[in-house]
Image: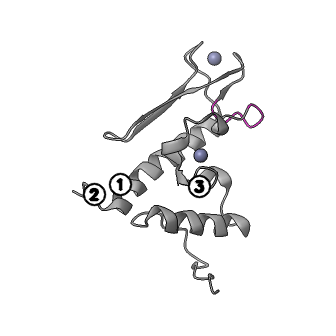
Amino acid sequence: MNTTTLASTTRLNPVSRPLPVLLAMEDDAEDVGRLSPDDRLTCHVHGRWIHQCVASPLHVNPITRHRWCRSCATALTVSVDELSGAVTMSCPRCGHGASAASARLIVACRASLVAARRGSGARAA
Ligand SMILES: [Zn+2]
Ligand SMILES: [Zn+2]
């Protein structure tokens, strides 16, 4: 199987690709070290767009502080607004809990929202 179709000089272009295609591309790119797990728009565990499963407990990590408030030792609550594209995370106890890891996750969720919208071809403006 020839799967080496990734352009070597360009970044992955996630827009306008259906979920299964991008999922496979990101798996390959991650395997060869070209893509950080944090920058994925798809989730290889759940097989979904990252914004669709980020609320799962599996996406909480106290060590890396993805979706984790260290002060309260509590998982952050995720809010995803598919219409406006807004993604927020906050600690249910203190209302804060931001971390670099969570900020990166939010960026990925926003991008996956956009990619999912374009990839589906629905609601295109
Ligand atoms: Zn997931
Ligand atoms: Zn907190």
State whether residue 118 is above or below residue 93: below
Q: Is mark 3 within 8 Å of ligand 1?
A: no
Magenta-span inclusion, residue 9? no
Looking at numbered disc 1 in the image, what kind of residue is underneath it? Arg
Discs 1, 3 touching: Cβ within 8 Å: no
Marks 2/1: CA–CA distance: 7 Å
Q: Secondary structure at mark 1?
A: helix
Identify which residue is drawn at 47% across, 61% down.
Answer: 19
Circle 2 sits on which residue?
122
Q: Which residues are magenta?
A: 62-67
Q: Secondary structure at mark 2?
A: loop
State whether residue 86 is above or below residue 71: below
Figure quadrant of the C terminus: bottom left
Magenta segment, prevailing SS (helix, strand or loop): loop
Marks 3/2: CA–CA distance: 22 Å
State whether residue 37 is above or below residue 84: below
Circle 1 sits on which residue?
117
Looking at numbered disc 2 in the image, what kind of residue is underneath it? Ala
